[in-house]
Amino acid sequence: MKVIQTLGYYFPESSGGTEVYVDGLVNQLNSQGVKSIVAAPQKGTQEISYEHNGISIYRYPVFRDLTLEQIRDVTPHGGFEYFAQWLQQQKANIYHQHSWATGCSIHHMRQAKQLGMPTVLTVHVPGYICLRGTMLLNGQQVCDGRIEQVRCGNCWAMARGIPASLAPLLSRIPLPLSAIASSSLSNNRLATALATPTLVATHQNRLLEMVDLSDRIVAVCQWLYDALLLNGVAKEKLVLCRQGVDSTYPKAKPNLKFSIQTSEPLRIGFLGRWDKIKGIHILVEAVCRLPLDVSVELVIHGLVQGDEGRAYQQQVLARAANDPRIRVAEPLSRAAVPDTLASFDVLAVPSQWLETGPLTVLEALSVGTPVLGSNLGGIAELVRHGIDGWLVPAMDVAAWSEAIAYLTRNRNVLDKLRQAIASVRTMKEVALEMANLYQQMENL
């Protein structure tokens, strides 16, 4: 059996959670006799092929200077014909897509369907459902994910800086008028505001078409599964298949995890992007508010992506500058992650959106490190509060400070949490489920 795995970004220039997931999945599938080839876009005009981690990779071009129609996925990106020709030549049994981005979009799924290939879509992020991308209604409370023109339009407009008093009016603009505004104005703030209802309707229609084009849709966590059901995805088409850690990932060594000495600072670690949705500012503020007699060391291994990430980093560092308990370290290579996680007394995951994992939670639990995380989304599905980790209201800085102080002064609690950590799901288990799914689809 031959499977094409596509996603919007890939190694070596990108190493996010979806990339790590696909890398682990493909390696395990290959070991089970299911051959997979990874296809991903790259900016430029050339196509290239290479191997990464023993996996065959094909990179097709996405021409620069995208038009507004291409950005909005109305038309395929420049260079799409390279992908279309390559896909036809592969004569694969299954097409499996893991992204919904300009370089890996509904056009790529359509192409696979036109070739008669059975298709699978794995949903890794909230953006498939939520225009805002966070699954937090008006940025404040957990949303059920049902796409509704007025509610979603209001939430989206506020996310774009439209005043709360004006957003409800924009979300109620009749669709014909909104469509005219969307097609006749440039891509500026006014056009975006007036086009809000059209953007919501287009997003919903694209989701429904993607669902129609997919023979099976894989949700990697329960809240995503439930949200897809609410948006009309047939239950018989949906599959819940949770993430896992690499099968070779180090396991906890109980003999090396002994009681923390209260004379040593509590070592709290953070791994992730410098991005507001990752909540580093909440964590830093929580530590800064603690009295100096609270013995804690916060180590931040953050990755900067783009100007926005750099600006956010500088803003957070300015707040942390006068607190010697906060240390900013270099971003980690994938190889260094296990030992670093094992060196922490607790991993902090203060996400300000609904994660579908994140992978760092599973990796921390795998090496025996408890997680202090936001009580949201996938984190709350993976961490059992007071049993193998500690959950905190995501945006409540005072609650984060209180939790850190409590764990610092009650080190025996961390020992109990650590001892209760169960075995973590692996990518071998994920791959077995995927291989079984592929076999079922091929036999239809």
Image (spheres, helix red, strand yellow):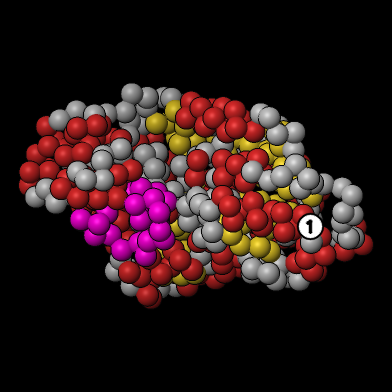
The answer to whether residue 1 shows anywhere in this view is no
Which quarter of the figure has residue 283?
Answer: top right
Residue displayed at 60% across by 32% down = 319
* Residue 47 spot, x, y in % from top left: 47, 30
What is the tally of numbered marks visible in this picture?
Answer: 1
Q: Is 29 on the left or on the right of 366, as rendered?
A: left
Any magenta on residue 276? no
Q: In which quarter of the image is the N terminus?
A: bottom right
Front residue of 338 and 434: 338
* Residue 130 spot, x, y in % from top left: 35, 53
Which quarter of the figure has residue 423?
Answer: bottom right
* Residue 341 spot, x, y in % from top left: 75, 49
Front residue of 85 and 203: 203
Specify the amino acid type for callout 1: Arg
- Placement of 76 over or under 363, stated as above or below: above
Front residue of 130 and 402: 402
SS type, badge 1: helix
Residue displayed at 48% across by 68% down = 222
Q: Is 9 on the left or on the right of 271, as rendered?
A: left
Instruction: Residue under label 1, please give it.
Output: 409
Number of other residues with Cα within 10 Å of mark 1, as a class: few under 14, some 14 to 19, many 20 or more? few
Residue displayed at 62% across by 46% down = 286
Residue displayed at 32% across by 69% down = 230
The answer to whether residue 78 shows anywhere in this view is yes
- Placement of 125 over or under 244, stated as above or below: above
Q: What stretch is highlighted in magenta?
A: 130-152
- Placement of 250 over or under 72, stated as above or below: below
* Residue 253 spot, x, y in % from top left: 86, 60
Front residue of 351 and 208: 351
Task: Give the main secondary structure, helix, strand or loop, of the magenta stretch.
Answer: loop
Instruction: Name the residue at the bottom extreme.
Output: 236
